[in-house]
């Protein structure tokens, strides 16, 4: 998908949200708010270990068309499901009352109210072009768009820097998914043309220039068509293993294990599975720092080997890849990519590859051919352009 195609798609999803609102409620919305999905350039499963991540926002976004009602209660229509749900203040007093996709909306209302904000009642219509189950943070895009809409509609005194934590709390405490803060931070705080270097302990951010065009490069995203499930026991098991490793090493989080101390730390761990999990997180944190150093210096092409090393670590030490993503990485590298890795929580989802811009189509073709040879469902591919975080649309 070219940049022009992506702009057209963004306009289309905004129009669908507007049309859906008018169709459902009879009047045009007071406004429209958008929040993007994200690709994590590098730094997987480091966020909940207080480590470092480097995501950037995608042009694909979720749009919320909304109007405040002046009374209690919220009505939400989703284009994706075709459903219209309603919930009131009693449903957002305790976590988990609203189920399904509506939980992400209700959870956002709950998190705002629990933080002391007077959340306006509202009618909302939601449309999205962020692929579901592909590891591109469709849930964070939904939470971030809803939060941004409600903050504006209610005139809430809520600084942008504080918003990711509330959106994350909606997902953790209300929906029940133990995700880190990276997804919501990317969806809210990213800037166009940059990657977001986030310290997940201090929440300090630095906007790192990610100028692909001037280097003649592109990031090709390949949807493996092997959907992942964050709520699965596998994600929880990885997080529990990391926490067990930190306890065994006597540190607050695995971020506190320095790279030059890793061998000694691993020698203190009896469980070989825990050793592998710890090794991934500690080495992945260092790969993020090394990638940031290269990007600061404008040496974009040189991050390729770090991306590939990240994938090997996820495959062998964290054990979160599946055959579809491994094949996509191998095929992209064989076709000339400078580096490739799975992005997202794992067990499916997407692969990103750093490629010469004029070779992106060839690389995508080779990945598709490799899938066909193995009888996999054909992948979908597009170019990812670093986009802006959550905002109100004109």
Image (spheres, rainbow, N blue to C red):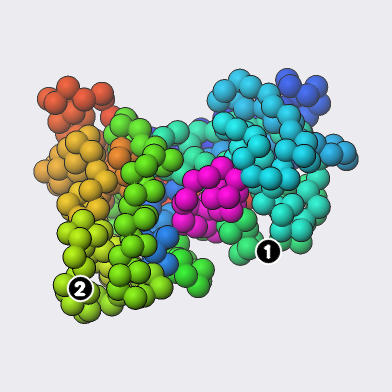
Residue ID at (31%, 30%): 225
- Pointers 1 and 2 in contact (C-beta within 8 Å): no
In which quadrant is the C terminus drawn?
top right
- Separation of residues labelled 1 and 2 (CA atoms): 43 Å
Quarter of the figure with residue 212: bottom left
Q: Residue lying farthest right?
A: 70
**189 inside magenta stretch:** yes
Q: Is residue 285 above or below residue 63?
A: below
How far from the left and from the top, in percent, is residue 371? 18, 28
Q: Mark 2 points at which residue?
A: 268
How far from the left and from the top, in percent, is residue 193? 45, 57
Quarter of the figure with residue 372: top left
Q: Is mark 1 on a helix, strand or loop?
A: loop
Q: In the drawing, what numbered circle is on residue 236?
A: none
Q: Mark 1 points at which residue?
A: 159
How far from the left and from the top, in percent, is residue 103? 61, 37
Q: Can residue 185 be seen in this view?
A: yes
Q: What stretch is highlighted in magenta?
A: 167-190
Residue ID at (41%, 42%): 230
Nearer-N-terminus badge (1/2): 1
């Amino acid at each position: 998908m070219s940049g022009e195609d992506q702009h057209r798609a963004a306009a289309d999803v905004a129009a669908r949200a507007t049309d859906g609102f008018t169709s459902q409620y009879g009047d045009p919305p007071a406004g429209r708010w958008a929040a993007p999905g994200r690709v994590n350039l590098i730094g997987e499963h480091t966020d909940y270990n207080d480590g470092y991540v480097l995501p950037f926002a995608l042009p694909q976004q979720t749009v919320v068309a909304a109007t405040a009602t002046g009374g209690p209660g919220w009505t939400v229509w989703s284009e994706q499901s075709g459903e219209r749900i309603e919930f009131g203040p009693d449903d957002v007093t305790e976590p988990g009352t609203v189920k399904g996709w509506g939980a992400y909306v209700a959870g956002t209302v709950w998190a705002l109210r629990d933080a002391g904000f007077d959340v306006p009642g509202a009618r909302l219509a939601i449309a999205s072009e962020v692929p579901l189950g592909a590891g591109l943070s469709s849930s964070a895009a939904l939470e971030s768009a809803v939060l941004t809409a409600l903050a504006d509609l209610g005139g809430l005194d809520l600084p942008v820097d504080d918003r990711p934590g509330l959106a994350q709390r909606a997902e953790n405490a209300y929906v029940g998914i133990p995700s880190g803060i990276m997804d919501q931070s990317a969806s809210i705080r990213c800037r166009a043309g940059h990657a977001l270097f986030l310290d997940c302990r201090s929440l300090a951010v630095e906007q790192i220039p990610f100028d692909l065009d001037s280097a003649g490069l592109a990031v090709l995203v390949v949807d493996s068509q092997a959907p992942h499930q964050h709520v699965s026991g596998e994600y929880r098991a990885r997080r529990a293993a990391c926490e067990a490793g930190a306890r065994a090493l006597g540190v607050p989080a695995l971020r506190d294990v320095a790279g030059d101390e890793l061998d000694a730390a691993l020698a203190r761990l009896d469980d070989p599975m825990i050793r592998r999990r710890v090794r991934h997180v500690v080495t992945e944190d260092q790969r993020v720092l090394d990638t940031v150093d290269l990007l600061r210096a404008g040496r974009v092409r040189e991050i390729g080997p770090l991306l590939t090393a990240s994938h090997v670590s996820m495959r062998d030490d964290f054990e979160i890849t599946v055959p579809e993503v491994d094949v996509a990485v191998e095929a992209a590298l064989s076709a000339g990519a400078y580096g490739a890795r799975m992005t997202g929580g794992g067990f499916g989802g997407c692969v990103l590859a750093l490629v010469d811009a004029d070779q992106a189509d060839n690389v995508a073709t080779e990945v598709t051919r490799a899938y066909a040879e193995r009888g996999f469902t054909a992948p979908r591919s597009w170019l990812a352009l670093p986009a802006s975080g959550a905002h109100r649309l004109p």
